[in-house]
Image: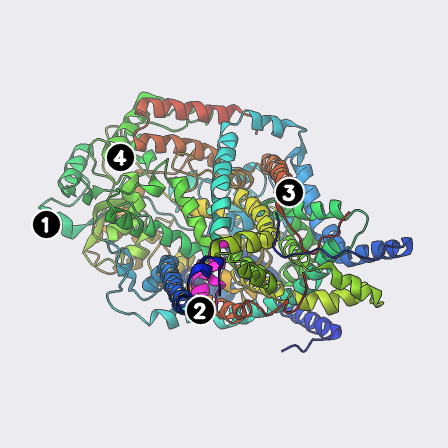
């Protein structure tokens, strides 16, 4: 487009500049972007590459020195070995069930509560919000034992209940906070217009705010799924029966008393990461500029 | 911070007292799930932990009241102070770095270029690596003789330090590791960027803004709610870091990476001193609250909410 | 894509998932056996396998007791202790469980576990088949608080190939500190830059050197720390010199590259001190290896032994049955069933170490009988000890380790280390519990 800088040039020169400069600039910019991202990706990929490399090695080669990224021979056998050493199929199913139960609860309760903290004015709101934030600041290690005793008294130990039920009561301040921030960026006019039309608060929440919050809800979904997948301490404490184990717990079982089965652990870790990666890859496609807010005035 | 082309529309109908009461009731109704959950599941344990800080409790027997003894003990405990220092330095350096990096990266990854999905997934990868694997991998990457890191440094003629074996470089090593965990912040930023109104960018471009100015004047202000989020969450999380130092350095060498929560954990579960651990946590809690309040207070100046109600 | 799920659908799905999960979670109650007792251990893929024959045999021979192996999950991850303590607090601990070395006294002091003298007497169980050193670690306040399920001393594994190359005789009982140092020096090679290509020996545990020099950690009554005494300082000096003076043992930098275990397997470490369980990894070495007894120090020949403590929960509703399980796990038969298949542990009974399944064990490129007999020799001859038994041992150990770190880094002299450690430990010993 025309800028003031080019006003002094002649008409044809202007057009020529107009044609080639931005195109070249755009191309260069694109190349630069790819270059930066490629280098960054290579760096970020390194830990994962080492995992994969180890997963394909023979146990002996894991200790080779200097460490070599290339396995001497590709030991694909490690994968079926690792995945059958423990009932990972069952663990995956368990984890999915747990994730499903939790994510629904989180989406519902956290968005409701976040709505209260962002779109409504009520007595005690800011104080309660700070209490909510404060719960984030208490390390779980300290509340672990009292909470275990509580659930033990309820008889919920060795079931999924301690892991699922609190999700329906917005037990995750992180998500509430995140959704609250997101809701606060939605213009007021929509609520006001809807209220003039006679809509109730729940309708505003359900029909206006939620649909506009798809990116945030997607983010919450990704996080919730990922947290659940890698969760270790809570399932460890509450699940005694091996049949109930989750994927995160299963992985830890490769650590024996005097040694760790590295190749199997890595093979299992890599396999276990795949579902989360796929979920992420599919969901992140919604993060494309312009899905929301087309045509809205500021 | 002036935002180009953005007008605030006024003309909201005045509230009647009836509406306010209704809104009040609605507010409480909507927040009820959390209140119930808090009272039922979270409040009790938190209160218990607080009370325990005034006792001597070994977890397995009944607690014994000791009043302020635990807190007094902290004053004479050089390790507690050292641990607080380690944690503070880590937080002060890694949180701003992580936030900045995640922001820039999100800007870069918000372009619909080819393969952006793959790039995003790659940057997200380190966040989901299982913890046990991470510890081993990073030991290799940071290996003094043959680690990739020192190898790269040697290419530019710098002799890499002993990283995790060095008292001065162990903490920087952990800070470096933390930069790989920005996958989460990346997601949040990407989500937030979707909410920046497209017409703001159009207006900026019409006014002849460069890439830099465009993002400085439009994106940054619009993203401040999320930056605030990341700063607060980042702060809270950084002050509670524990698993990596536990697995990788056990607090060493010579307490160079004795993070506060690691010290708390040791007291709670290895030394049978849950009471003291709770007291330490109490102090950490106050510390976090203070810092968070500071950030939230400052937020009034630099955070912009599109949907903020005035008054 | 914009089809909105109704509110009811959400509740249905969520409720269904919750109910489904809850159902999955509840375990059906069996009402077969009279009494059920459980044994808790960290577990792991290989460990779980190893326990199966033990529990099968027990359940067969004890029809009125149903014994369950209840791995507390997490493998040997650091969270085992957290898990265990939470369950104890919640009243859900296993009847019998494994706890780490050095924690028995602490648990005993806090009445988490019960002394078993009465049960031992009632069952007529002879304790003299157990190695004295192991039992010592369970003796607290004149009572016995547990039984060892296994436990290996630290012996000297060595890389036979490297010894052959250098033309040095293998380690044996004649070795003292001088010969040990000579061999280690001859087996250490460095490159032009001074970096270690091959190191002669692993560091060995600091306490081994202290004991070998005739020093002590705590005095017999357990009320003062003796690390500031001359013999202990001698031991600390030798430990430090291996790393700092003679540089035959890995420095902190070397260890940041690889652990000693890994170094040994990579053929970069000629000798290292390890428990017999290390065979789990060493058997995969691609060079001939064997093990020998620890060297003789100026004071005595002594090395630390691990123990696999099995203790009885004070909150167990079926203590007699629990003791039966404990007894079986630590019996010769029980140990054989667990150890024989893989061989990666050392039995805690003298009789077991005389049996063919133990003495004849071979794996990988093991070059001799040292991997069995060296360990047995050490215990039989009384060249082993366990960590001092003290309820505050974890704190004491942490305090000492910090000083030792400084020693190895070259930041403190042996005298300073010993005295500072003694001072810290004495503070802990006199502080109110």
Give me the C-alpha separation between circle 3 and circle 4.
71 Å
Q: Is residue B211 visible?
A: yes
- Badge 2 marks a residue whose secondary structure is loop
Identify the residue position indicated by label 1 in the image.
Answer: C165
Segment tinted magenta in the rendering: B103-126
Quarter-of-image position of residue C400: top left
Give me the C-alpha separation between circle 4 and circle 2.
70 Å
- Badge 1 marks a residue whose secondary structure is helix
Q: Which residue corresponds to the image point at 49% horizontal and 33% vertical from the top-left?
A: B85
Give me the C-alpha separation between circle 4 and circle 1.
28 Å
Instruction: Return the x and y of residue A118 as percentages of the image width and height.
Output: 72, 55
User: Is there a contact, CB below 8 Å, between mark 2 and mark 3?
Assistant: no
Q: Give residue B301's mark.
A: 3
Give me the C-alpha separation between circle 1 and circle 2.
60 Å
Identify the residue position indicated by label 4 in the image.
Answer: C301
Give me the C-alpha separation between circle 1 and circle 3.
73 Å
Front of the two marks 4 and 2: 2
Q: Which residue lies furthest to the left in this view?
A: C167
Instruction: Return the x and y of residue C336 as percentages of the image width and height.
Output: 38, 58
Front of the two marks 1 and 3: 3
Q: Give residue B113's mark.
A: 2
Give me the C-alpha separation between circle 2 and circle 3.
35 Å
């Amino acid at each position: 487009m025309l800028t003031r800088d080019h006003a002094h040039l002649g008409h044809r020169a202007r057009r020529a500049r107009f044609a080639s400069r931005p195109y070249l600039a755009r191309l260069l910019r694109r190349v630069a972007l790819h270059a930066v991202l490629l280098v960054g990706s290579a760096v970020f990929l390194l830990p994962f590459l080492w995992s994969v490399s180890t997963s394909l090695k023979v146990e002996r080669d894991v200790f080779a020195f200097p460490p070599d990224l290339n396995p001497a021979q590709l030991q694909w056998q490690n994968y079926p070995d690792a995945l059958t050493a423990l009932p990972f199929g069952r663990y995956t199913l368990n984890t999915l069930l747990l994730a499903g139960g939790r994510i629904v609860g989180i989406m519902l309760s956290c968005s409701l509560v976040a709505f209260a903290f962002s779109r409504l004015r009520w007595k005690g709101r800011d104080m309660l919000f700070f209490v909510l934030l404060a719960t984030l600041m208490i390390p779980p290690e300290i509340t672990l034992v009292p909470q275990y005793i509580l659930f033990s008294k309820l008889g919920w130990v060795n079931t999924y209940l301690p892991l699922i039920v609190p999700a329906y009561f917005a037990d995750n301040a992180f998500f509430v906070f995140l959704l609250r921030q997101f809701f606060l960026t939605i213009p007021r006019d929509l609520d006001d217009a809807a209220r003039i039309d006679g809509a109730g608060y729940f309708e505003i929440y359900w029909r206006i705010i939620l649909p506009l919050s798809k990116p945030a809800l997607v983010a919450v979904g990704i996080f919730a799924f990922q947290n659940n997948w890698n969760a270790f301490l809570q399932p460890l404490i509450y699940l005694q029966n091996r049949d109930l184990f989750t994927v995160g717990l299963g992985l830890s079982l490769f650590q024996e008393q005097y040694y760790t089965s590295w190749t199997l652990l890595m093979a299992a870790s890599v396999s276990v990461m795949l579902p989360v990666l796929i979920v992420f890859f599919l969901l992140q496609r919604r993060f494309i500029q312009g899905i929301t807010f087309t045509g809205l005035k500021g | 911070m002036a935002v180009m082309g953005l007008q605030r529309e006024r003309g909201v109908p005045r509230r009647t007292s009836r509406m306010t009461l209704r809104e009040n009731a609605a507010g409480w109704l909507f927040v009820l799930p959390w209140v119930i959950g808090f009272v039922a599941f979270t409040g009790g344990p938190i209160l218990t932990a607080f009370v325990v800080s005034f006792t001597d409790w070994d977890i397995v027997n009944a607690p014994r009241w000791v009043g302020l003894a635990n807190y007094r003990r902290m004053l004479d405990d050089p390790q507690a102070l050292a641990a607080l220092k380690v944690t503070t330095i880590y937080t002060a350096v890694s949180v701003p770095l992580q936030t900045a990096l995640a922001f820039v990266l999100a800007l870069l990854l918000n372009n619909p270029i080819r393969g952006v999905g793959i790039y995003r997934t790659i940057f997200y990868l380190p966040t989901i690596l299982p913890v046990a694997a991470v510890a081993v991998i990073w030991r290799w990457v940071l290996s003094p003789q043959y680690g990739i890191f020192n190898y790269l440094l040697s290419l530019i003629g710098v002799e890499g330090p002993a990283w995790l074996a060095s008292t001065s470089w162990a903490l920087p090593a952990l800070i470096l590791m933390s930069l790989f965990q920005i996958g989460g912040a990346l997601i949040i930023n990407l989500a937030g960027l979707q909410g920046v109104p497209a017409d703001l960018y159009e207006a900026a471009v019409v006014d002849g803004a460069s890439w830099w100015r465009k993002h400085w004047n439009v994106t940054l202000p619009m993203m401040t709610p999320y930056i605030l989020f990341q700063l607060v969450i980042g702060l809270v999380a950084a002050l509670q870091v524990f698993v990596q130092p536990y697995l990788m350095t056990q607090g060493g060498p010579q307490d160079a990476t004795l993070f506060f929560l690691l010290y708390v954990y040791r007291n709670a579960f290895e030394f049978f001193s849950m009471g003291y651990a709770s007291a330490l946590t109490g102090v950490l809690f106050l510390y976090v609250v203070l810092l968070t309040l500071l950030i939230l207070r400052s937020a009034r100046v630099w955070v912009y909410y599109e949907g903020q109600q005035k008054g | 894509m914009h089809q909105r799920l109704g509110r009811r659908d959400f509740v249905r799905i969520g409720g269904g998932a919750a109910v489904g999960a809850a159902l999955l979670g509840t375990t059906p109650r069996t009402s077969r056996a009279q009494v059920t007792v459980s044994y808790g251990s960290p577990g792991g893929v290989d460990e779980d396998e190893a326990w199966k024959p033990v529990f099968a045999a027990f359940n067969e021979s004890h029809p009125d007791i149903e014994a369950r192996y209840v791995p507390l999950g997490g493998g040997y991850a650091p969270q085992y202790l957290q898990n265990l303590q939470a369950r104890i607090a919640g009243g859900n601990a296993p009847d019998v469980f494994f706890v780490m070395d050095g924690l028995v006294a602490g648990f005993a002091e806090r009445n988490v576990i019960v002394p078993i003298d009465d049960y031992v007497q009632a069952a007529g169980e002879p304790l003299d088949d157990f190695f004295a050193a192991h039992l010592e670690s369970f003796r607290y306040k004149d009572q016995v608080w547990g039984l060892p399920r296994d436990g290996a001393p630290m012996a000297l594994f060595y890389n036979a190939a490297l010894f052959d190359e250098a033309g040095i005789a293998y380690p044996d009982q004649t070795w003292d500190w001088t010969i040990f140092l000579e061999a280690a020096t001859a087996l250490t090679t460095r490159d032009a830059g001074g970096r270690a290509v091959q190191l002669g020996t692993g560091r060995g545990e600091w306490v081994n050197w202290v004991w070998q020099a005739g020093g002590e950690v705590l005095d017999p009554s357990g009320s003062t720390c003796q690390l500031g005494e001359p013999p202990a300082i001698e031991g600390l000096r030798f430990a430090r010199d291996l790393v700092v003076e003679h540089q035959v043992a890995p420095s902190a930098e070397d260890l940041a590259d690889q652990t000693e275990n890994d170094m040994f397997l990579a053929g970069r470490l000629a000798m290292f001190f390890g428990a017999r369980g290390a065979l789990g990894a060493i058997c995969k070495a691609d060079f001939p290896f064997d093990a020998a007894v620890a060297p003789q120090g100026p004071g005595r020949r002594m090395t630390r032994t691990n123990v696999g403590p099995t203790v009885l929960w004070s909150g167990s509703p079926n203590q007699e049955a629990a003791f039966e399980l404990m007894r079986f796990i630590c019996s010769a038969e029980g140990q054989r069933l667990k150890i024989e298949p893989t061989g990666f542990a050392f039995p805690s009974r003298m009789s077991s170490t005389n049996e063919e399944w133990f003495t004849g064990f071979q794996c990988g490129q093991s070059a001799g009988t040292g991997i069995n007999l060296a360990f047995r020799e050490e215990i039989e001859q009384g060249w082993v000890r366990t960590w001092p038994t003290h309820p505050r041992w974890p704190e004491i150990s942490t305090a000492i380790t910090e000083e030792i770190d400084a020693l190895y880094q070259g930041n403190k002299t042996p005298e300073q280390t010993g005295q500072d450690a003694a001072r810290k430990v004495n503070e802990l010993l006199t502080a109110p519990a």
